[in-house]
């Protein structure tokens, strides 16, 4: 039966996309990766599925293109098996103390292009800035920083020098984050332009060919801890793709977890 199902999926998605991956369920040892992107390629230098047992503080980086990265939970950041976007769980953050981080690494230093993406599920809107992702030098300037600001808008910053937001000083998105709803967000630098997508729809683009600087600070998801800016909600399927602009126009967000 599993061979028949694998063959059917292979015919539907084409041989270029077919990959043998673990398939959950009795009697199955492998299956065909169901989709045209696969997604975990040699350009993928960080990939967090946020899968595991409820309340686990183990965040496994499954990237196929980079080094092994250890993500450490801070506060009460943990996995939660209630309403994940994909898989068995999602990362959950309480908005006051929680974040995960990994040490800075060359895998996060892009010189020609990059794509940063994830699914987010905000559960509350604060009256102050909250940070979803950052790698800010001593808590100040970083190669990239994404917030939901006090106006309940996505806002993006980027620096090439570590002393100013010279690449992007806080462009706000026009599409608002929605509470208790999964939304796909992607930041893309093509080498000449920055793009911000929400659910696959381009919200803004800014021309800039300056290379982001190589931070010496950890990469954090769920906070800018030095400034007490904590995200309240869930994150799933975080992917960092180095030196590749995966999208520069509208696209359909993935409908499954990246694999293998």
Image (cartoon, helix red, strand yellow):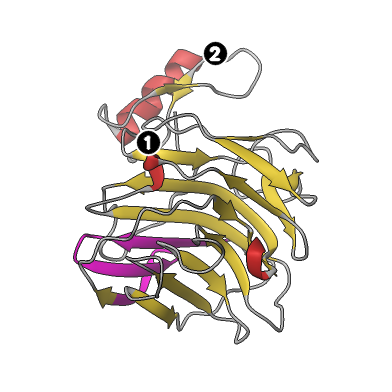
Q: Is residue 90 visible?
A: yes
Q: Is residue 28 above or below residue 18?
A: above
Nearest the eye: 35 or 40: 40
For label 2, count other residues whose C-alpha is less than 10 Å away and answer few (under 14), some (14-19) or many (20+).
few
Q: Is residue 107 above or below residue 139?
A: above
Q: Which residues are magenta?
A: 183-205
The residue depicted at 31 percent of the width and 53 percent of the height is: 114
Q: Secondary structure at mark 1?
A: loop
The residue depicted at 29 percent of the width and 75 percent of the height is: 205
Distance of mark 2 from mark 1, alpha carbons?
18 Å
The residue depicted at 25 percent of the width and 29 percent of the height is: 16
Instruction: Report which residue position mark 2 lands on.
Output: 29
- Which image quadrant is residue 67 in? top left
Q: Position of residue 77 (x, y in %)?
A: 74, 49
Circle on res. 38: 1
User: Taking 63 as reference, is 103 left or right?
Assistant: right
Do the residues bearing badges 2 and 1 touch, measured as CB atoms within 8 Å?
no
User: Taking 125 as reference, is 152 left or right?
Assistant: left
- Main SS, magenta region, reads strand
Q: Secondary structure at mark 2?
A: loop
Q: Is residue 85 above or below residue 15?
A: below
The residue depicted at 61 percent of the width and 54 percent of the height is: 235
């Amino acid at each position: 039966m599993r061979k028949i199902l694998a063959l059917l999926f292979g015919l539907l998605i084409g041989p270029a996309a077919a990959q043998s991956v673990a398939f959950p369920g009795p009697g199955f040892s492998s299956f065909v990766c169901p989709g045209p992107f696969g997604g975990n390629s040699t350009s993928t230098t960080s990939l967090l599925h946020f899968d595991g047992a409820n309340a686990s503080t183990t965040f496994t980086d499954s990237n196929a293109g980079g080094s092994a990265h250890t993500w450490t939970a801070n506060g009460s950041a943990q996995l939660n098996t209630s309403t994940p976007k994909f898989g068995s769980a999602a990362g959950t953050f309480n908005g006051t103390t929680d974040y995960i981080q990994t040490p800075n690494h060359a895998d996060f230093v892009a010189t020609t292009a990059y794509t940063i993406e994830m699914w987010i599920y905000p559960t509350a809107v604060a009256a102050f800035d909250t940070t979803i992702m950052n790698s800010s030098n001593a808590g100040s300037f970083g190669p990239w920083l994404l917030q939901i600001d006090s106006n309940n808008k996505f806002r993006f910053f980027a620096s090439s020098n570590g002393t100013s937001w010279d690449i992007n000083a806080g462009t706000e998105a026009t599409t608002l984050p929605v509470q208790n709803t999964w939304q796909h967000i992607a930041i893309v630098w093509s080498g000449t332009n920055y793009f911000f997508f929400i659910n696959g729809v381009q919200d803004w683009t800014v021309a800039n060919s300056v290379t982001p600087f190589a931070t010496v600070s950890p990469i954090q998801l769920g906070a800018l801890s030095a400034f007490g800016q904590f995200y309240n909600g869930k994150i799933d399927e975080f992917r960092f793709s180095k030196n590749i602009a995966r999208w520069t126009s509208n696209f359909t967000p993935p409908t499954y977890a990246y694999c293998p």
